[in-house]
Image: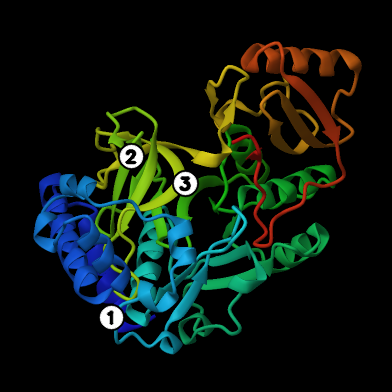
């Protein structure tokens, strides 16, 4: 941990208690700076602004961002990398981040050393706000690509210790390593911690963690309850991305997700228009720190709900009440009604007893397949299936074909994530 990163962390922690008007001024100052820089130094945005008849002086406040066309993943994938990054940036001295590619093709973003330190400081701020201590031992179950090759000098001194385990390791090996290390904190995808929790319950293994952190997947209520109760831990969920790092996070009040508004601008849109408080909208993000590869009005393909009220924890960062999931993970009834993924689990089952993993796939407009990994406790009889099918048809329409598929395992994508809701119906 460098001195610059410590200074960055100090300033970021001070931002948590700024008055909303002060936070807004800081955000818009950073916004004007990144807009001007991108216009002058990044071919992609210079051309995008010019083709829309815009210049940097046209964007003075957050409300002015609607003038700027959205930036999509497909645009970035189709644009030569040299046109996406600022001139004079040496790519060889930067870190390349790749998205998980859950939509088919991974997206590459470039971050320099200072940007990396800023991203780490933002994560550390959230962890420390939620109880991370300097001498805590933390275990992270993650994709192998994210496992550091060696410990930092600070970690060798016993500070901010973090051991990583591959998410693709057998659950028996993961458990053995955790039982040996006895960490204070565990961190992973919700699905990974749910698998570990079920393994511990089946084998009567006991392990307590003071804190548990989840990220990268939709966290449903039942999975949260399973992890928290099995490990006797308070669980905090984080919303991040490869493009922007940590974007929003839960605090001890669990009243929503605090948006990192001092590092980015969130917009919530429906049909291109800003939604009102409490309404669901697609998340559009503008980063304020990455000058190597700025991303302005970037379409996240995620959905959230903005909240106007401040959190009782004392942090003045704005809240997003919930994260429903990716916009392309929303299902549709035969009549075209949008069904959010949050309706599932335990729905359509009255009880989740014995359900280890699940996935809902809408294969076409009139067909849904629900995949289940079940244990011995699951009540497997014709009445259960018939009742569950009836509930799905009540929600999606009587013409919906509903199939249940018992499987040994639900495969993960290349990054180790498990998508619980997949819509193949466009």
**Frontmost residue, 196 versus 158:** 196
Residue 233, above or below 385: below
Q: Residue at x 84, y 33 (%)?
A: 405
User: x and y percent of residue 358 in the render?
Assistant: 73, 37
Mark identifier at residue 268: 2
Badge 2 marks a residue whose secondary structure is: strand
**Frontmost residue, 83 versus 182:** 83
Q: Residue at x 24, y 76 (%)?
A: 41
Spatial separation of the CA atoms under disc 2 and disc 1: 33 Å
Q: Is residue 307 left or right of residue 24?
A: right
Spatial separation of the CA atoms under disc 1 and disc 3: 33 Å
**Frontmost residue, 17 versus 371:** 371
Give the mark nearer the N terminus: 2 vs 1: 1
Give the mark nearer the N terminus: 3 vs 2: 2
Looking at the rendering, in which quadrant would you find the N terminus?
A: bottom left
Residue 421, above or below 24: above
Label 2 crowd (10 A; few <14 / some 14-19 / many >=20): many
Instruction: Report the label total.
Output: 3
Q: Nearer the viewer, mark 2 or mark 1?
A: 2
Label 1 crowd (10 A; few <14 / some 14-19 / many >=20): few
Q: What is the basis of the colouring in this image?
A: rainbow
Q: Residue at x 30, y 59 (%)?
A: 296
Q: Is residue 139 left or right of residue 304?
A: right
User: x and y percent of residue 263 in the render?
Assistant: 28, 60
Looking at the rendering, in which quadrant would you find the C terminus?
A: top right
Label 3 crowd (10 A; few <14 / some 14-19 / many >=20): some
Q: Label 1 belongs to which residue?
A: 4
Badge 1 marks a residue whose secondary structure is: helix
Residue 176, located in which quarter of the rendered image? bottom right
Mark identifier at residue 301: 3
Residue 374, located in which quarter of the rendered image? top right
**Frontmost residue, 49 versus 155:** 49
């Amino acid at each position: 941990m460098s001195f610059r990163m410590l200074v960055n962390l100090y300033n970021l922690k001070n931002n948590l208690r700024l008055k909303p008007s002060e936070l807004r001024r800081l955000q818009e100052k950073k916004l004007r700076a990144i807009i001007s820089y991108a216009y002058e130094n990044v071919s992609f945005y210079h051309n995008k602004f010019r083709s829309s008849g815009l210049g940097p002086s046209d964007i003075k406040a957050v409300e002015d961002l609607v003038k700027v066309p959205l930036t999509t993943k497909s645009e970035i994938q189709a644009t030569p990398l040299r046109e996406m990054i600022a001139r004079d940036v040496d790519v060889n001295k930067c870190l390349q981040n790749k998205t998980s590619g859950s939509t088919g093709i991974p997206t590459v973003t470039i971050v320099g050393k200072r940007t990396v330190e800023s991203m780490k400081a933002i994560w550390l701020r959230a962890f420390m706000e939620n109880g991370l201590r300097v001498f805590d031992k933390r275990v992270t179950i993650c994709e192998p690509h994210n496992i550091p090759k060696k410990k930092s000098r600070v970690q060798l001194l016993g500070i901010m210790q973090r051991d990583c385990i591959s998410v693709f390791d057998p659950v028996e090996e993961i458990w053995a390593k955790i039982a040996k290390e006895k960490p204070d904190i565990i961190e992973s995808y919700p699905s990974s911690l749910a698998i570990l929790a079920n393994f511990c319950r089946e084998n009567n293994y006991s392990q307590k963690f003071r804190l548990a952190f989840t990220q990268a997947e939709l966290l449903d209520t039942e999975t949260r309850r399973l992890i928290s109760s099995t490990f006797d831990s308070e669980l905090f969920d984080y919303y991040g991305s490869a493009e922007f790092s940590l974007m929003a996070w839960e605090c001890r009040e669990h009243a929503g997700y605090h948006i990192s508004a001092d590092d980015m601008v969130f917009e919530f849109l429906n049909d291109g228009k800003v939604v009102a408080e409490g309404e669901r909208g697609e998340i559009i993000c503008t980063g304020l720190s990455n000058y190597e590869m700025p991303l302005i009005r970037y379409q996240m393909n995620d959905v959230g709900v903005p909240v106007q009220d401040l959190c009782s924890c004392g942090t003045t960062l704005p809240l997003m009440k919930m994260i429903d999931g990716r916009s392309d993970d929303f299902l549709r009834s035969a009549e075209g009604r949008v069904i959010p993924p949050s309706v599932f689990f335990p729905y359509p089952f009255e009880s989740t007893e014995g359900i280890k993993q699940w996935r809902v796939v809408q294969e076409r407009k009139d067909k849904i397949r629900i995949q289940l990994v079940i244990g011995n406790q699951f009540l497997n009889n014709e009445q259960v299936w018939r009742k569950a099918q009836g509930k799905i048809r009540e929600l999606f329409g009587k013409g919906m074909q509903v199939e249940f598929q018992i499987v040994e395992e639900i495969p993960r994508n290349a990054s180790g994530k498990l998508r619980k809701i997949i819509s193949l119906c466009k």
